[in-house]
Every structure is written in C-alpha cells, then in structure tokens.
Image (cartoon, helix red, strand yellow):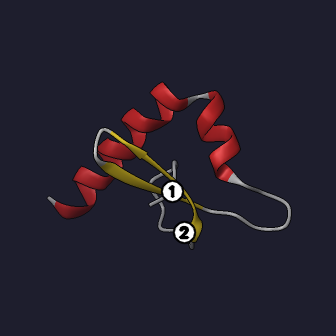
Amino acid sequence: MGFSGEKVEIDPSTFKILNGKLYLFYHSWTNNTLNKWNKEEDILRNKADKNWANLYH
C-alpha cells in the first residue's frame, strides 16, 4: 500500500524495519520511495499505518 493509499509494486530489497514492523517500498530507476520516507518518516509512517489498517478492517 503506497503513501496515497493505493496498492503499488514494491522492491523487496528496499525496506525498513521499525518497532517490529516491516515497511516495503516502491523502487524504480527514477524513484525510490524509501528516500522520501526517510525525509518525512513520522508523517508517512502514520499515513501508512492508517492505510494498512483501513485495508484489512
């Protein structure tokens, strides 16, 4: 699930583990969303957690 709430393809080698949660990121030749995540981690983590909860509840 992307930052926007849409499903996106991920690159399993581009990830981050925070507080026991695995976060996977989109990565292409022109875009690596892990870089954006690292700049805005608090805001994007909250969005990601809410989007994930909405997807499965």
Residue 47's place in the image compared with 25, above or below, is above
Measure the alpha-carbon separation of dots 2 and 1. Answer: 6 Å
Judged left or right of residue 55, residue 57 is left
Q: Secondary structure at mark 2?
A: loop
Residue at which label 1 appears: 2
Q: Residue at x 59, y 39 (%)?
A: 37
In the rendering, at what x and y percent does residue 34 appear? Answer: 63, 48
Q: Quadrant of the C terminus?
A: bottom left
In the rendering, at what x and y percent does residue 56 appear? Answer: 20, 63
Locate residue 55: give its quadrant. Answer: bottom left
37 and 16: which one is in front?
A: 16
Are the residues tagged 2 and 1 within 8 Å (C-beta)? yes
Mark 2 or mark 1, earlier in chain:
1
Q: Residue furthest left?
A: 57
25 and 3: which one is in front?
A: 25
Residue at which label 2 appears: 8
Residue 52's place in the image compared with 13, above or below, is above
Name the amino acid type tagged 1: Gly
Q: Quadrant of the N terminus?
A: bottom left
Q: Residue at x 46, y 26 (%)?
A: 42
Name the amino acid type tagged 2: Val
In the rendering, at what x and y percent does residue 12 appear? Answer: 54, 70
Bin the neighbour count of mark 2 within 10 Å (Cα to Cα): few under 14, some 14-19, many 20 and up: few
Bin the neighbour count of mark 1 within 10 Å (Cα to Cα): few under 14, some 14-19, many 20 and up: some
Q: Secondary structure at mark 1?
A: loop
1 and 19: which one is in front?
A: 19
